[in-house]
Amino acid sequence: MPQNNETNNMKQPKLLYIVRHGETDFNRQRIIQGSGVDTSLNATGRQQAQAFFEKYQDIPFDVLITSKLRRTHETMHPFIQKGMSWEQFSEINEMNWGIHEGKKGTPEMVKSYQDMIAQWQEGNFDARLKDGESAAELARRMQVFVDHIRTRPEEKILVCSHGRAMRCLMCVLKDQPLQKMETYTHSNTGLYLVRFDGEEFHFELENDTSHLG
């Protein structure tokens, strides 16, 4: 019996180029952004974005997918200017850090963050900062995004997201427990190159910043 198109698409090999956005002033000042603070790139971030574009501009990407936050749009602006097909997904927005967003870390904030991470390490993925998102909630939306990616027909997909969101996304792609999030690093414009063989995701590059020289 012939398979339907969605099933065929799920089996189709893909290359995913997943990159974190470029630097913002809040990154430099160590102010929490999360999903509720929609900052722009600073001069360094724009340079990082241009360096990434110069290295990867000749790859025939089929589609660009970003979060709905400005810092990912600005990082991918050179690709958008080329006329690349572009879609935005709130599922890959940064984690909601609740009352910490827009603030520079105080000792009290650092302690509450560390306490939450410790709870995640013990398996309590419902732990959250006040008014923020839990690891379990973040993982659920990352799973929605991965399930969507599996069904897409494109073979080369460029994705731009955020630090904690990417840490969680890597766990979902590898089918790992969320405790593993802390093992993934995320430099500004750091690239994860992921090959999907039709069944599983295989990592070929992790947080690669060779384009920055």
Image (cartoon, grey):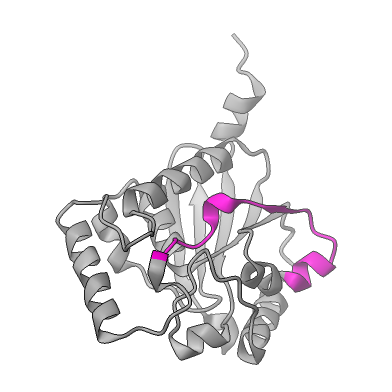
* Closest to the observer, 57 or 25: 25
Relative to 211, say whether 207 is above or below.
above
Residue at figure coordinates x 43%, y 58% from the top left:
203
Query: Is 95 in the magenta?
Result: yes
Residue at figure coordinates x 52%, y 80% from the top left:
209
Residue at figure coordinates x 51%, y 74% from the top left:
190
* Closest to the observer, 202 or 39: 39
Taking the view exactly as shown, the residue that stands out farthest to the left is 122
Q: Position of residue 62 (x, y in %)?
A: 73, 52
Q: Position of residue 149 (x, y in %)?
A: 57, 43
Left or right of 142 on screen, residue 12: right
Q: Quadrant of residue 67?
A: bottom right
Left or right of 177 on screen, residue 211: right
Whether residue 164 is visible, yes or no, is yes
Q: Quadrant of residue 200?
A: top left
- Tell me the magenta residue range: 77-98
Relative to 89, say whether 150 is above or below.
above
Query: Is 83 in the magenta?
Result: yes
Q: Position of residue 56 (x, y in %)?
A: 68, 71
Residue at figure coordinates x 57%, y 90% from the top left:
213
Q: Quadrant of the N terminus?
A: top right
Looking at the rendered structure, the number of numbered marks drawn on it comes to 0
Q: Position of residue 117 (x, y in %)?
A: 24, 65
Relative to 74, say whether 4 is above or below.
above
Left or right of 91 on screen, residue 100: left
Whether residue 197 is visible, yes or no, is no
